[in-house]
Image (cartoon, rainbow, N blue to C red):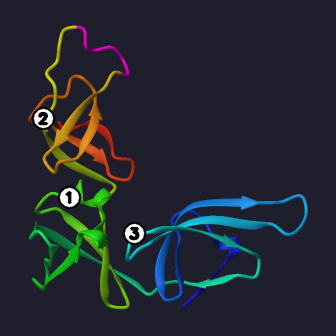
Amino acid sequence: MATIGMGDLKKGIRLEIDGQPYRVVEYQHVKPGKGAAFVRIKIKSLSTGRVIEKTVHAGDKFETPNLEQKTMQYLYDDGEMLQFMDTTTYEQIGLTHEQVGEDVIKFMDEGFTVNILFHNGKPITVELPQVVELEVVETPPNFKGDTSSGSRKPATLKTGAVVQVPYHILEGDKIRVDTTEGKYLDKVK
């Protein structure tokens, strides 16, 4: 395993602390008036989803986690676990709602292809594609004059997620959504 030092840290990099895998979600280099520079990071646990803050100094080193990624298909939510299937071996695994995270679940529809992250052979979380296509199931009707630039209205998607969309989007339309920002991108033609 490679080691990661203070100079290697940046947003999105994965590291292992006390045997647990984390991803850097925020990064700030601090150069105080006195003393040595340091880095303040916010890291998200890939197994629990919890975010913690940590200060990293010049001599601190971290290991890169032993992570494997498998493409799997989301099948259904049985109430306790979300069920996924490997499309080549047909092997099924279940992950809890906490492992997946509500911010991911709200953009997952049955049949979606997702990446399951494994740490030391054990499934720990789901990574969605950056862009997904979902159907609008509920949104207010359009009224004459509602086309002013920049105006938005709420739209409920098939998965239950609510995003702000332009006024020309109607119920039944398929739209593309950025899953990291939770924002409308465009209408699927």
Q: x and y percent of residue 141 in the render? A: 13, 21
Viewed as shown, does residue 146 lie left or right of 62? left
SS majority, magenta: loop
Q: Residues within 10 Å of mark 2 (few under 14, many from 20)?
A: some
Part of the protein shown in magenta: 145-150
Q: Amino acid at mark 2?
A: Glu
Tell me, yes or no, whether the two marked residues, 2 and 1, touch with CB atoms within 8 Å. no
Residue beneath the point at 25% across and 14% down: 146
Q: Residues within 10 Å of mark 3 (few under 14, many from 20)?
A: some
Q: Amino acid at mark 3?
A: Gly
The span from disc 2 to disc 3 (Cα, nearest Å) is: 30 Å
Choose mark 1 or mark 3, whichever is in front.
Answer: 3
Q: Please check the rendered image and state whether residue 147 is part of the magenta-colored stretch, yes or no.
A: yes
Question: In the drawing, what numbered circle is on residue 49?
Answer: 3
Residue beneath the point at 17% across and 13% down: 143
The span from disc 2 to disc 1 (Cα, nearest Å) is: 17 Å
Q: Find disc 1 in the rendering and name its residue.
A: 108
Judged from the image, the secondary structure of the residue bearing numbered disc 3 is: loop
Residue beneath the point at 53% across and 70% down: 13
Residue beneath the point at 10% across and 32% down: 171
**Which mark sits nearer the N-terminus, 1 or 3?**
3
* Total labels drawn: 3
Q: Please check the rendered image and state whether residue 180 is part of the magenta-colored stretch, yes or no.
A: no
Tell me, yes or no, whether the two marked residues, 1 and 3, touch with CB atoms within 8 Å. no
Q: x and y percent of residue 3 in the render? A: 61, 85
Residue 14 against residue 104 in the figure, above or below: below
Viewed as shown, does residue 60 lie left or right of 32? left
Q: Find disc 2 in the rendering and name its residue.
A: 138
Viewer-side residue, 94 vs 98: 98
Judged from the image, the secondary structure of the residue bearing numbered disc 2 is: strand
**Which mark sits nearer the N-terminus, 2 or 3?**
3
Residue 33 against residue 18 in the figure, above or below: above
